[in-house]
Amino acid sequence: MVQLGVEPEVLGTYQRQLVENGHVLIPKIEIEIDGHIRVYSLLSTLTEDDSFSYLKGIQGQFVDRTDEFKLRREREELLEQKIKDRSVIEQKTSELERIANRLAKYLAPQIYKSIFESGTDPETSFKRKN
């Protein structure tokens, strides 16, 4: 485990949990393979079987979780971007409200209402007449 990069203090904690609980889960072990970081989890169980000598000791299973962690990181980035987008939308909305309120002072109420309350484009709904 030390060769995989697990710190000695953490390894001691896992060894104690293995003795106390009979099993331990290491949720994230980062290993560099060919210049790429891969993420694994390890579930280890303390086994004792008198019938099969190879089942005595610690049995463990590595599970490759690299894709899962990539997806989780992408989801977190998307959530952060969503929060930033929401902030920009709120800022632009308040800016438009401020502009609309300032224009209300200079425009006739009918014109203001036609611009800001109707769903039609003012250029297409009004025509100049002689």
Image (tube, rainbow, N blue to C red):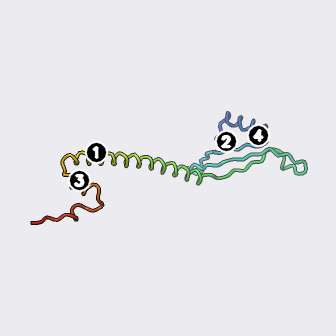
Looking at marks 2 and 1 on the same chain, the residue that comes earlier in the sequence is marked by 2
Comparing 4 with 15, the one in front is 15
**Image coordinates for residue 18, horizontal then vertical, percent:** 76, 40
**In front: 77, or 60?**
77
| Tags 3 and 1 touching, CB below 8 Å | no
- From mark 4 to mark 3, how far is it between C-alphas? 73 Å
Looking at the rendering, which quadrant does residue 3 occupy? top right
Local crowd size for mark 4, using a 10 Å CA cut-off: few (<14), some (14–19), many (≥20): some
Quarter of the image with the N terminus is top right
Within 10 angstroms of label 2, few (less than 14), some, or many (20 or more) residues? few
What's the CA distance linking mark 4 and mark 2? 19 Å
Q: CA distance from mark 3 to mark 1?
A: 14 Å
Q: Residues within 10 Å of mark 3 (few under 14, many from 20)?
A: some
Left or right for 97, reference 48: left
Q: Which residue is mark 4?
A: 18
**Marks 4 and 1 close (CB-CB < 8 Å):** no
* Tag 4 secondary structure: helix
Residue found at the far right of this picture = 51
Label 1: how many Cα within 10 Å (few below 14, some 14–19, many 20+): few
- Tag on residue 112? 3
Amino acid type, label 2: Gln
Amino acid type at mark 3 = Tyr
Question: In the rendered image, which residue does mark 2 sit on?
Answer: 3
Image coordinates of residue 83 in percent, x first then y, are 44, 47
Front of the two marks 4 and 1? 1
Observer-nearest residue: 129 or 11?
129
Spatial distance from mark 2 to mark 3, Cα to Cα? Answer: 72 Å
Q: Residue at x 28, y 45 (%)?
A: 98
Q: Image quarter for residue 102?
A: top left
Mark closest to the chain's N terminus, 3 or 1: 1
Give the residue number, with chain letter if any, for mark 1: 98
